[in-house]
Amino acid sequence: MIAGLIETLFQGITLGGLYGMIGVGLALNFGILRVVNLAQGELITIGAFLAVGLVALAPGLSFAAVLVGAFAGCALIGAAMQAAAIERAMAFRDPMVPMLVTFGLAVILRNLLVETMGADLRGLDVGGLGQARIDIAGLSLGVLPLVTLAIALAAFGGLAALIYRTAFGRQVRALSDRPDIAALMGVRVRRVHTLVAALSAGLAAIAGVLLAMRASVSPFSGVAHLLVAFEVVVLGGLGSIRGALGAGMLLGLTQVVSSRFDGNAGLLYVHLVFFAVLVFRAMTGRLS
Amino acid sequence: MTTALRIDALSAWHGAFRALSDVSLTLEAGRVLALVGANGAGKSTLLGLLTGRVPGWTGKVEVNGTALPPGDPRAASALGLALVPEGRLLFDSLSVEENLLIGGGGGRPGPWDVASVYRLFQILREKRHQRPSTMSGGQQQMLAIGRALMSNPSILLCDEISLGLSPPVVAEVYAALAEVRGQGTAMVIVDQDIARVCATADEVACLFKGRISHRGPARGTTPQSIREAYFGVAA
């Protein structure tokens, strides 16, 4: 009974780490660039397909190399989108303009994916890892969820260290606070924007790889990912890294626990919890 | 004596509104200029264009003999201009020390680093791990000055330096500026407290509706003489 409960919690935390990863790129992009990137879901999908493609091309590649490759590929796409299109749209005062640009980019990316990869579902073959279990302190835990959780936590830890402990992170936070004053301090505004967009896209790729290891993705999965990402960002606080992890955990735990009682619920209770938190915040006047 | 700042036939626009008309000014190295004038006279516009934040201007601006390109804050910083902005505009996502570090990002050599700013404002060392918003207004102003000094400017621009500060704090801030000046840094100080700023400055320039209406030594300048300059009434 206790063991079952702990295992449920473990699964919830694992899924939560994944949800946090899905949301954190969006949170970062919004927090620093003030751009709601509607292409984030597509970037997650592209990350997954890049990993699938890398494994197909070079079956002997280590998992770490696949992860790095997907990260780098998506980061390049993210940087290119920022430099070529989104940065220009940001010159308009209306935040709607860059958001619409990312919507257009999302449509383009989605159709490019269908064109090149077909509409089939793909997954990352993890071999026996999917069924492998390991005993820790009398508990039998899945290796794949452990790996997922470890990668998600490492990514969060690395991101927090980058943003809060390095000179680059200092520039990023200063730019987020007051772009004009930061520029006066010698911060290269466009360069930092492009790097942040690359980082967000790279985080999306990690989320995509983790997703592809546990389930299949199709070129049309992006919208579903974006919905989860939005819930994570809104619950966790716009631009908050720690908040994204916490919100991901809440939603992941909700999904796993609710599936124990109602196997067909899917994301229903996740959305309900999201809704309930929003209603609670509205009633207590802490909506923004 | 070398010229730190030379402004020639400068006009600036905010859209269709002409904020500055044919302004010419020079500031020798290490000298302090008090820039006074009513709200809307163009003081903040002048500081804004010197720091690349107001792009729409014509005329010529030279900093230590090099032409200043319009609308380029990084170039302004690299040429040796640093701003203590009105309202301080600190980075509240950064600690006090990080605010200083980011101020020194331009990499100009000079006497100012974190240690020397802490010597000037010892309270900042005590609060170095705090967020700026947890400090008093005076401490925030000291941080804003320290952040600007970190770039080792040849000209320090101070906008509304004593706004919202209590008299003892204003005295402390001016005492610090006197020390900064001792390092050979030229300054342009905008302040509503004309008597106070003129007691520190070498020269005074008065802006009236975007034009320089009065220019002279700061010594002996009183609110009364400025008022006469504003309204064009002979003393």
Image: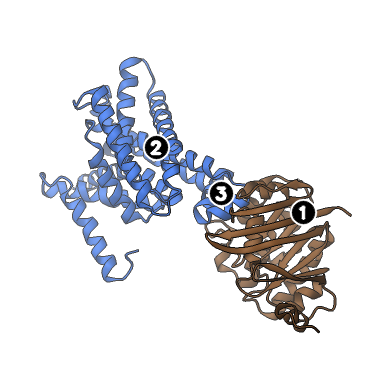
Chain colours: A blue, B brown
Residue at point 36%, 34% (across, down): A205
Callout 3: helix, strand or loop?
Answer: helix
Q: Is any part of residue A4 visible from this angle?
A: yes
Of A82 and B128, which appears nearest the observer?
A: A82
**On the picture, is A53 further left or further right than B140?**
left
Residue A252: give x, y in percent of width and height. 26, 47
Viewport quadrant of the C terminus of chain A: bottom left
Image location (x, y in percent) of residue B92: 54, 60
Q: Are marks 3 and 1 on the same chain?
A: no
* Numbered tag placed on residue B154 in the rendering: 1
Marked residue chain, label 3: A
Is A266 drawn above or below residue B44 in the view shown? Answer: above
Q: Residues within 10 Å of mark 2 (few under 14, many from 20)?
A: many
Q: Are marks 1 and 2 on the same chain?
A: no
Q: Is residue A12 left or right of residue A179?
A: left
Give the residue type that dot 2 points to.
Answer: Ala
Q: Callout 3: 10 Å neighbours few (<14), some, many (20+)?
A: many
Q: Nearer the viewer, residue A244 or B3?
A: B3
Q: CA distance from mark 1 to mark 2?
A: 41 Å
Q: Amino acid at mark 3?
A: Arg
As measured in the structure, the alpha-carbon distance from the residue carrying label 3 to the one carrying label 2 is 20 Å
Q: Nearer the viewer, residue A225 or A2?
A: A225
In the displayed structure, B147 sits above or below A24; it is below
Decide: is A191 above or below A209: below
Dividing the picture into quarters, in which one does residue A115 lie? Answer: top left
Rendered position, A204 above or below B39:
above
Can residue A137 be seen in the rendering of this structure?
no
Looking at the image, is mark 1 or mark 2 nearer the viewer?
A: 1
Q: Which residue is mark 3?
A: A170
Question: Residue A201's mark?
Answer: 2
At mark 2, the secondary structure is helix
